[in-house]
Amino acid sequence: MRIKRVNIIIQVIVWFAIFLSPILYLDWGETIKVSTILRCVAIPFCLLITFYANYLWIVPRYFFNGNRHKFYLLNIVIVLGLTIFISLMMKWTGSSFMHTHFMPEAQDYPDQALGIYILHSLHPIFKLSVCVIVATLVRMSLRWVEVEDARALATMEQREAEIKSLRYQFHPHFLLNTLNNIYALTEFDVPKAQTAIIELSKMLRHILYYNDRAYLNLSEEVSFLNNYVNLMRLRLPESVEIKEEVEIVPGCEINIAPMLLISLIENAFKHGISPTLKSFIHLKLYADREKIECEIINTNHPKPPSDESGSGIGLQLIQRRLDLLYPGRYIWEKGTNADNTIYSSKITLYDTQLHHH
């Protein structure tokens, strides 16, 4: 809408200048006749007709639709017809267009009368042809802008649809893992299983009320992550070391995409805990006005091929969501140490307000 408004303003200014320029060359010391004014505005008026005939009708209907023969034919008819009109107008007013300043008259140079006559005839044809070209170029540029806007809108809608699809894919995956954990608790500690169900209800409430948002406050997401960690603690022996460090600079509003980091924590609990070997999970989250950093370091106990408790879809989903929500504004560093005993994953987000919307 803004582009169209600016385009209209530019056209008004340009046409005002075109109509005004011949009048500036008038001799204001003499009496201005109606025929003199008509002589001055004849060519600008014909240029105006030629421009908007192409801009509003010929170019959109014939040039853009591939009917170039009609495009050229109509413009030839318009240019020749308006050229005849200009010649008749100049003959009626007794002069060519501003001959004093732009071109000579035949009576002033009898030996060059034929050349001057041809020059007079070609002069309006040249101007009108240039006007056709300008109108076509302007219309093409506007169409290109419209096509690019439509393409950008389609891309944005497709991205939003994919983000929603990823969210819907994530829910079953997350709930399946969580329910498996609660089921494991029911085998040896019913009170803990009951506590786990309470923690799960808190998480489901979070999913119900917050997951459809484009973004939410980081403190709300941290509360969700804390509920999940508390849920996982219930089934772990006390020998497993779990540390949480959360530092959010006070006084600044920080947003994040909902349920973006939960897959990292799930992965840490799935591959970082061993029933027989020493295990630990360290979670550190830091945020200020410039960035959000989430780092998870855990012991690495890969699951055997026979264990089908997870397919790794969680990390694939988070990678895709990062690409869609934070394109070019995130860093994800992950990998194991030299002896493959410790795994670390660190995501840094450089958009704390989700400005992609």
Image (spheres, rainbow, N blue to C red):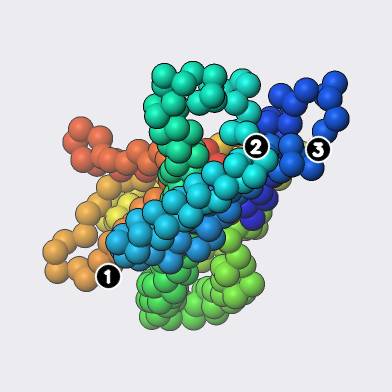
Q: Can residue 81 be seen in this view?
A: yes
Give the vertical position of 170 relative to 72 (above or below).
below
Dot placed on the residue nearer the N-terminal end, 2 or 1 = 2
The residue wearing badge 1 is 309
The label shown at residue 300 is none
Q: Which amino acid does label 2 sit on?
A: Gly
Q: Which amino acid does label 3 sit on?
A: Lys
Q: In the figure, residue 111 lies in which quadrant? A: top left
Q: Tag 1: Cα neighbours inside 10 Å, few (<14), some, or many (≥20)? A: few
295 or 188: which is nearer to us? 295
136 or 226: which is nearer to us? 136
Q: In which quarter of the image is the C terminus?
A: bottom right
* Residue most extreme to the left: 305
Q: Which of labels 3 and 2 is toward the front?
A: 2
Q: Tag 2: Cα neighbours inside 10 Å, few (<14), some, or many (≥20)? A: few
What residue is rendered at 43% in x and 66% in y?
Answer: 61
